[in-house]
Amino acid sequence: MRKRLFLVGTAILAAFCIPAARSEAQTFDRIKGQVREHVISNGMKWIVLPRGDAPVVSFHVYVDAGGANEVNGITGISHLLEHMAFKGTKIVGTRDFSAELVVLGRLDSLYDAITREELKTKPDTAKIAAQKRDFESLRMKAQEFVVGNEFIDLFQNEGEPGINAYTSADATQYINALPSNRLEFWMAMTSDRFLNPVFREFYKERDVVIEERRLRIETQPINKLVEDFFATAFKAHSYQQLGIGHMSDLKRITHDDVKSYFSKYYIPSNMAAAVVGDVDPDEVFKQAELYFGRIPGGPKPEAPRTVEPEQWGERRVQVVAQSQPILLLGYHRPDIRDRDNQAFDALANIIGQGRSSRLHRILVKEKKIAIQTGSFNGWPGSKYPNLIAFYAIPSQGRSNAECLEVILAEIEKMKTEPVGGDELTKYKRSMKKGLFDAMKQNGDMAAMLTSSEIQEGDWRKAFDGIRDVETVTAADIQRIAKSVLTANNRTVGEVMPENPAAE
């Protein structure tokens, strides 16, 4: 929630870059009133906030598909598809698409043949070796048709400072910023990206993601812990797996898997777009219908059916590694639409966020048994029931057990003693200061509008954040601490040094 509030604040200045005396008179309702929305003929929602103080515009396309939508066998596919979305279309990124398509088809067929042979009870190793040699020859042939990075280069040539995209547990998001007179260019290029994608260099890019997993997860003790921690805290919901995917899945995901996943989730009813900047809303809607309206519509895909069941007792997981000890504990909490969402944010902030938080003050400053501590709220995603979590990295010669004892003691205080008025006031002030300090980029407004539209069902929810901060009470925080921060609802994870004597 804190991130959402940050985006709200950033958006306000982006929407109204005017003298301070006048900006103070602007209300959230008036800003909200400037936003226009329109659903084009195929069901895609468009949200526009005009802002004419500078000839620039930010674009944000939010696809309601992330790690939570993946199933075993294709974990990591959302992230891989994000990579592939920069490879171009039938007209961008290729020297001869018709000829390229023939080679790509042969490449996929040969890969499928290799896989079938490898899965046999007694695979023919000589045959596989020959097939792999042919496969590499075909890969080189396919590469001859590729115009590398043409999609990105075209955007940069039109003034894009840094084309971007990212995948999370909840979504995949595509981000652009361009001069305002490049609106139609963006519409044409981006709609073509979703209408006629060509996932060229698939096997090469898949290898890049495999290496990314190896470097980010398998060589990093703390990320090994996070992976096993999610797998332990969530026994049923797909938040149990990291968005990077399992190594075995990454090695087996096929070109057809990606095309099928794209066809299922990259449809107008499952996407929302926001445009913020120097634009005429009516022109945006007209261009959206002209270009994005070409994409076939269809019903929104079914959301994940599985709901994480109630936890019946404390769970524990350990990772043994050449590392200092690390402690992580988390508690299940409701999704972002819950009425206590802001109270959870306040709880996490007061206990563990910042140098003035309770855990930093006690563990780091006073007792000196940790070198770092903190908390997360809405982890690993927020659209579905998730976690509020706390961590500590013990000081040299100190242990996870010592840190855990202190953290649990502070959690018990949250249940038995209402937070002080000064703590709550400080939290609210810091949140507001963060809002107004961050009022710079209209790209954050676009992100906030799409996120609220998809995750909470209405972009207007984004503007409720500043009011939500004011409504949080000490009683709210104490109530959720009693109901959620319980032993039966807790998962504890540890990195244990492989050679404790050396620590």
Image (cartoon, helix red, strand yellow):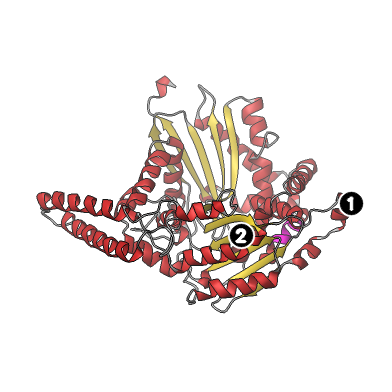
Q: Is residue 51 above or below residue 430?
A: below
Tag nearer the camera, 2 or 1: 2
| Residue 484 visible at all | yes
Q: Residue at x 69, y 55 (%)?
A: 442
Q: Residue at x 44, y 60 (%)?
A: 92
- Quadrant where the image shows the C terminus: top left
Instruction: Tell me if label 2 and label 1 are in contact, CB under 8 Å.
Output: no
Give x and y (percent) for residue 41: 57, 79
Q: Is residue 463 magenta?
A: yes
Neighbour tally class for label 2: few under 14, some 14-19, many 20 plus, Cα within 10 Å:
many
Amino acid on which disc 1 is placed: Ala
Q: Position of residue 293 (x, y in %)?
A: 54, 75
- 164 and 65: which one is in front? 164
Which residue does the image show at 64% across and 35% down from the upper left?
359
Residue 426 is tagged as: none
The residue closer to the viewer here, 457 or 277, is 277
- Say whether residue 479 is visible: no
Between disc 2 and disc 1, whose residue precedes?
1
What whole-number distance in Å separates the C-alpha atoms at marks 2 and 1?
29 Å
Q: Which residues are magenta?
A: 462-469
Q: As rendered, which of 265 and 416 lies closer to the eye?
A: 265
- How would you classify the magenta stretch by its main secondary structure? helix
In x, y percent, where is residue 467? 77, 58
Residue type, numbered disc 2: Phe
Q: Which residue is mark 2?
A: 59
The residue that appears at 65% across and 59% down in the rendered structure is 446
221 magenta-colored: no
Density class for disc 1 (Cα within 10 Å; few <14, some 14-19, many ≥20) is: few
Q: What residue is pinned by disc 1?
A: 21
